[in-house]
Amino acid sequence: MPKLLIVAEKPTVAKDIAVAIGGFAKNDRWLESDTAVVSCAIGHLVEVFTPDAAKSGRDLLSLPVIPAQFELRVLERTADQFRLLAQLMKRSDINTIVNACDAGREGELIFRLIYEHAGCSKPIRRMWLQSMTADAIRDAYRHLRPGQDFDGLASAARSRTEADWLIGINGSRGITRLKERQTAAAASMSVGRVQTPTLGIVVDRENAIRTFVPRDFWEVHGTFKVAAGTYVGKWLDPKAKDEGSESPPERLWYLSRAQAIATKCSGKNPTDVTEESKPSLTHAPRLYDLTSLQREANTKFKLSAKRTLDIAQALYEKHKVTTYPRTDSSALPEDYVPNAIGTLKDLAGTQYESYAQKALDNGWVRPNKRIFDNSKISDHFAIIPTGRKPEGLSAEEAKVYDLIVKRFVAAFFPPAEYTATTRITTVEGEVFKSTGRVLVNQGWREVYGGSLKEEDKEKTPALTVFRAGELVTTEKIEIKNLQTKAPVRFTEATLLAAMENAGRQVDDEDLRDAMKERGLGTPATRAPIIEGLLADTDGAGAPKEPYMTRKGSELVPTQKAMDLIEFLRSNGLEYLTSPRMTGEWEFKLLQMEKGGYQRHSFMGEIEQLTRQVIDVIKLKAAEYKLPTTNARCPACSNELEVGVRVVECKSKCGFLLYRSVAGRSLSMAEVESLLADRALPVMDGFVSRAKKRFSAGLKLNDEHKVEFSFDNTAVTADAAGNEVHCPRCQGSMRRIKGAKGYFWACLDRENCNATLDDRDGFPGELPKTRPCPKCQRPMFLRTSQRGPFWGCSGYKTQECNNIVEAEPGEEPPPPRTGGKRAPARKSTGAKSSAGKSSAGNRAAASSSAKNPFL
């Protein structure tokens, strides 16, 4: 019977789908029923790449790197899961593949890359999940949509990924080489379509703070007495608005004028007091999208954007109490009114019950464009509760959940009603303005309790009561000496807002409208962008200087960030620091999603832009003359220019000498000797591909390329005088003394890194291997306190840690002379009398650690 293969984005989602649909049982490493198989990715399993990036693009001559076609490769850490999905897709009884990855560009990309790299051509159906409740899953399963309906979304996702790669790789390498040429110092710079404009926003604010010069100004305040008490009014210039002044109308820039007004009004009672009171409404805030939730959580609880995203994801995926969090929409579908009513009913028995019931009893849940609006929804609707009762929430999860539920319930309540009062007090023709606001009806603020009422009173307190016609006297007129304040640094909340509203910096109306939908980045990527700018370690865990640091709740750009933005702008690359590029991309990608723009056209434009960026960099680089060396080019005898990383021919004949070889930096004296004599004697400090240190000489071959040369007197024979040959390439091997004793290494260090242990002057045996029954990689015979065992080589990359007990008589070779045994494996109990049974238990335990369904 034909079956569906349902591919979720994560193991937990796969389990939830299987439970909601029902009828599934565990089957090795997936879940299966009579009609379907459910498995999953683990986030991204496949990535786009180009081999050209590793071989070229390391210098300006070989930039830009623009592949004719991007290739796909499996991520090593999750290769085993990809192989499983590929095998399932090939099963003869599976005739349709269902994409149940997250509903959006990224989820579409994750699935499509797996599908393409697996070579699958079976029909695709789309399971579009907005919520992880069982009802929502079953509804999405009943309404599977054709995969081709989402081809535009897939094209936009793939195009954005490849475009980011082209601009990121070429831009980063190009400006790194340019800065090195300009400063004659090693540099490591990076640019990105979203990262760099975001950093530009922070740097611009910092520059405004650093260059800010405070300016004195004055205000004239009058204190007036009425029967009920006193009130204060600020002098203002009623003509300021008409004259188009950008300064607040109460601000005076000259002390002499403030003094003249104070002198004129002091001791004089008001000649006229008028008051206008009118009702004022404040609507409930819109439902949360991810960015507004992150901003609120940062402001109220000091949670970072990334932490809030992690919590929101857990509330959705683990606890299933809220809907999909990675959304940029703050509205619900127009047909969602019955669902909203159901969710409010589900809040019975919780602390929100009375408010939810009040909204239901009053019939407040009805079509309303502030809440239900299809035009305001992109991939997903707003973040709301699912109605499921939360259990086992952490303190932080409970706080964020409370924000989401209160915002949802409050949205249906009527506006808060105020009486806003403006009082104008005239003294000797000068106008003093007083304002006050009184809460008349709490409306939606009732859901939030007393905290908001107190906050409201602090912002705009009520005015002392004035009755028309009563006597008003002047108690005092005083001058307040104040200063303008510098702009404040960004917090994560305000930076998220700036990223969301970055389109306001773009002049073009169409591009501004496109960015209105997403801004800089997407709700899901803004937190990682900020974290990346704050990162003080690289991908390998090595320390690096970050672009920003935290100072309390403030985000402060480092000097590295200041230098990068200044560098780009002063070198004609300000385009990379502007949100305009993102606006143009987003405008076209949104059209592509709807079928109104072709992927090949977009990528052609990106390639052209990449070439333009590199052309600008090369033009700037040509303006800076590199120092030269006395040595001449071995290829054409012209002068050689000395860069930070390379020595290259001034005539650009193609000769290039890297100043670092196998992890060892060459001094200029060594470079000049190598060029003059075409050879250098044996030196220490080289590191092989196997991460072993070794000594070697260098020489220039007939093609003027650098090669290793080794001491001809090196020991290449064993203790019996027999020549030792490399088991891999059949060349000679030499005996070397390393940090852990002697070992044998192939003389061809450039192309072959084979090594063997040493056994008292003789090369050791090749390690015994057998194929791993789980992943087919080599298994090596090893030993522990419990005895010999076979261990999969995949454990190094944490892909496969399969273990099988050795058969009686199987023993690994002894350790090298002077070497140390590998650390003993800790015993977890007495060895089973049946070796194979024990092996099975250990293999099962290993499999369980990697299998998401066991």
Image (cartoon, rainbow, N blue to C red):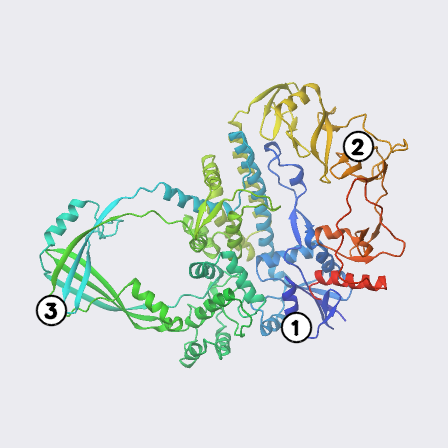
Question: Which residue corresponds to the image point at 64% horizontal and 21% vertical from the top-left?
Answer: 672
Task: Give the spatial CA distance, label 2 vs label 3.
Answer: 106 Å
The amino acid pointed to by label 1 is Val
**In front of the other: 507 or 350:** 350
Q: Quadrant of the N terminus?
A: bottom right
* Horizontal and vertical percent position of residue 135: 59, 74
Instruction: Quickly name the residue at label 1.
Output: 19
Q: Residues within 10 Å of mark 1 (few under 14, many from 20)?
A: some
Classify mark 2: helix, strand or loop. Answer: loop
The amino acid pointed to by label 3 is Glu
Q: Is residue 78 left or right of residue 288?
A: right
* Horizontal and vertical percent position of residue 231: 19, 63
Residues at discs 1 and 3 in contact (Cβ within 8 Å) = no
**In front of the other: 253 or 230:** 230
**In front of the other: 19 or 71:** 19
Residues at discs 1 and 2 in contact (Cβ within 8 Å) = no
Labels 2, 3: front one? 2
Task: Give the spatial CA distance, label 1 vs label 2.
Answer: 59 Å
* Horizontal and vertical percent position of residue 846: 74, 60
Instruction: Quickly name the residue at label 3.
Output: 470
Q: Residues within 10 Å of mark 3 (few under 14, many from 20)?
A: few
Classify mark 3: helix, strand or loop. Answer: loop
